[in-house]
Amino acid sequence: MSRVCAIEPALQLQPGEGGVDDMFAAREPGFAGLIQIILEQQVSVRAGQAMWAKLHAICPEFGPEPFLKLDDDTLKTCGFSRQKVRYARGAAEAILNGELDLPGLADLAEAEAMKQLTALKGIGRWTAEVYLLSCLGWMDIWPAGDLALVLAVEHLAGMDRRPNIKQMDAYGERFAGDRSAASLLLWHYYRRHLRPNAF
């Protein structure tokens, strides 16, 4: 964190703020963590967490096999859209048939881990990167397409419009090696300056 703040002092945590983990808590690695992230696609973290709480209450012994036994109506009551039902079931089936080895991702290079995750329908760059950051705790992950990060960078850098993916990746290069820490601090910055109740 200190190196990131030395590069960008505005990301320094303020008195009274906790560490970054209180805002973007680490998720359980594996299928449960991946499903939580799928639920958070295109919605707020808070909404995604509420959906996950409903799902976990219905299916406390959570895993690919128990998940596949849940019908569409049950998943809909938890907040799943039709698309997210397909994505989540596809991930469960890929794990059960051996196409996706989530524990094995920890031993791969980032590019190969991203390739394996994004081979699944509905798992794009954002979902894969957030999994590597928040479930596996990798230290140099930069979810450039995350809306909160985009808005934080726009505000912090004084841009007159939202940066595109290329601009976001270029901005993240200054934190190379510590991009996960930069991401977490930027989420804190977003909450502090733009959406105090976002997380």
Image (cartoon, rainbow, N blue to C red):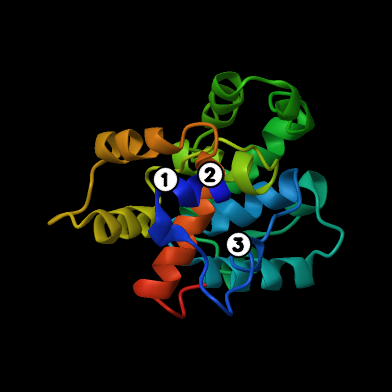
Does the residue at mark 1 contact the one at mark 2 (Cβ under 8 Å)? yes
Mark 2 or 3, which is nearer the eye? 2
The three-letter code of the residue at mark 1 reads: Ile
Residue furthest to the front in view is 6
Camera-nearest residue between 183 and 89:
183
Circle 1 residue: 7
| Amino acid type, residue under disc 3 in the picture | Val
Pick the residue in front: 173 or 138.
173
Residue 28 is situated, as x and y percent measured from the top left of the image, at 76, 52
Residue 86 appears in the figure? no
Circle 2 residues within 10 Å: few <14, some 14–19, many ≥20:
few
Pick whichever of labels 3 and 1 is earlier in the sequence: 1
Residue that extends furthest to the left in the rendered view of this protein: 160
121 displayed left or right of 28: left
Answer whether residue 52 is visible to the viewer in this image. Answer: yes
Few, some or many residues within 10 Å of mark 3 (<14, 14–19, 20+): some
Residue 104 in the image, given as x and y percentages of width and height? 77, 26
Q: In which quarter of the image is residue 159?
A: bottom left
Identify the residue shown where x is 41% and y is 56%.
9
Disc 3: which residue: 20
Q: Name the residue type under label 2.
A: Arg
Image quadrant where residue 156 sits? bottom left
Marks 3/1: CA–CA distance? 18 Å
The residue beneath circle 2 is 3
Q: Distance between the residues labelled 1 and 2?
A: 6 Å
The answer to which of 171 and 125 lies nearer the viewer is: 171
Residue at the image point whose x is 63% and y is 72% from the top: 18
User: Is 153 placed above or below 179 here?
Assistant: below
Nearer the camera: disc 3 or disc 1: 1
Distance Cα–Cα, label 2 vs label 3: 15 Å
